[in-house]
């Protein structure tokens, strides 16, 4: 199915899967660095509105970020999440982003430079075999990584290995099967979209081996990993700009919904053809038609767009644990 795809899941290549090497293969891995299927621009767009300053502060407190810390982010992409956490360093400490895709490593470097974050850097590496020394970091983290890897537990174990005893491991993953969506112009759209999202999550698991509903499994994964002092924080975050949010400029709002209309019509043939998914072509057409009517109707004037009570919120689960002291 296509209409309810998650924008951050937009693929550069439909068939490529993130590569996982074995634990001793970091040199070979560096030579075989994989281009990930994710698009840096779409990745940024899909989280740009997620964390208000208030929620970002709450998260830094939850993560116990303090000046002087050494932070490592695995699967850093463009470095968005690391930058949010690194604000809590107040210029003292360091941030190292690791990604298996050279395009992302470069994108993160550029973003760190642009945001004046001298203490941040990024490098190529595999999340299950980073090559970093044992106990390297005070805080190791990931955001939207466990949902895309073959073996999430192996990643958490590597995070524990590179974190010092008593240090913090923080993971943040979503669950797109439980989005909160409402459109006052078409109340029935919520149910149709919900069915479409279930189909999208199932098909993505089947075709790309990515689990976009993994968030709720974090406590089970953390318990299996042996992390201690577990704490869970759940937040519902906006997917795009909320139309009535005055902090978002008119032009930006229009640009976002124009993009969403285009994205709604884009088809990932592999996902659309996935077998065993309970979502018919007729439902797909119906969803697209209704969604386009809703968006285009509101795009007719700024006033109409601004007074739209539509919300699209994504559950995100943040789990932090400590590496046991031996
Ligand atoms: C969905 S993106 C999320 C990026 C970023 N954390 C964010 O939330 O914007 C997943 C990222 O993980 C990277 N990735 C996937 N498998 C990896 C692996 N085994 N080792 C390191 N990075 C990996 C991809 O290249 C991609 O940049």
Image (spheres, rainbow, N blue to C red):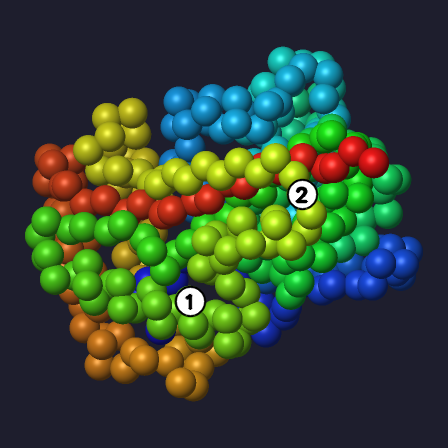
Residue 320 placement, left or right of 242: right
Q: Nearer the viewer, residue 292 or 201?
A: 201
Assess disc 2: are there few (<14), some (14-19) or many (≥20) residues with their C-alpha within 10 Å of its C-alpha.
many
Q: Nearer the viewer, residue 139 or 8?
A: 139
Ligand 1 within 8 Å, label 1 CB: no
* Vertical placement of residue 101 versus 310, above or below: below
The residue singled out by tag 1 in the image is 201
Tell me if I can see residue 181 in this picture.
Answer: yes
User: Quick check: marks 1 and 2 in contact, CB under 8 Å?
Assistant: no
Q: Position of residue 293 (x, y in %)?
A: 14, 60
Q: Nearer the viewer, residue 120 or 261?
A: 120
The residue singled out by tag 2 in the image is 227
Which quarter of the figure has residue 221?
Answer: bottom right
Q: Position of residue 276 (x, y in %)?
A: 40, 85
Quarter occupied by the N terminus: bottom left
First-in-chain label (1 vs 2): 1
Residue 188 placement, left or right of 103: left
Assess disc 1: are there few (<14), some (14-19) or many (≥20) residues with their C-alpha within 10 Å of its C-alpha.
many
Ligand 1 within 8 Å, label 2 CB: no
Marks 1 and 2, how far apart at CA: 28 Å
């Amino acid at each position: 199915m296509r209409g309810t795809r998650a924008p951050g899941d937009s693929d550069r290549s439909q068939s490529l899967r993130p590569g996982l090497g074995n634990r001793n293969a970091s040199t070979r891995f560096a030579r075989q660095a994989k281009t990930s299927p994710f698009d840096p621009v779409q990745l940024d767009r899909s989280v740009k509105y997620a964390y208000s300053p208030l929620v970002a502060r709450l998260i830094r407190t939850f993560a116990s970020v303090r000046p002087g810390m050494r932070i490592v982010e695995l699967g850093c992409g463009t470095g968005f999440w690391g930058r949010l956490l690194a604000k809590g360093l107040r210029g003292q400490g360091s941030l190292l982003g690791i990604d298996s895709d050279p395009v992302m490593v470069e994108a993160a470097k550029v973003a760190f430079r642009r945001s004046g974050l001298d203490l941040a850097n990024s490098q190529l590496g595999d999340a299950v075999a980073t090559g970093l020394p044992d106990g390297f970091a005070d805080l190791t983290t990931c955001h939207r990584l466990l949902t895309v890897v073959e073996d999430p537990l192996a990643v958490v174990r590597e995070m524990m290995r590179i974190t010092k005893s008593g240090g913090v491991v923080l993971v943040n993953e979503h669950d797109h099967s439980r989005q909160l969506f409402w459109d006052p112009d078409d109340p029935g759209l919520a149910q149709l979209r919900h069915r479409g999202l279930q189909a999208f999550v199932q098909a993505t698991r089947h075709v790309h081996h990515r689990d976009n509903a993994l968030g709720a499994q974090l406590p089970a994964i953390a318990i299996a990993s042996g992390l201690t002092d577990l704490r869970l924080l759940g937040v519902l975050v906006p997917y795009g700009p909320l139309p009535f949010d005055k902090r978002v400029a008119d032009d930006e709002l229009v640009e976002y919904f124009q993009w969403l209309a285009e994205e709604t019509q884009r088809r990932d043939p592999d996902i659309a053809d996935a077998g065993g998914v309970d979502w018919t072509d007729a439902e797909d057409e119906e969803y697209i038609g209704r969604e386009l009517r809703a968006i285009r109707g509101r795009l007719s004037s700024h006033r109409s767009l601004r007074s739209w009570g539509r919300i699209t919120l994504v559950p995100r689960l943040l789990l932090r644990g400590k590496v046991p002291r031996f």
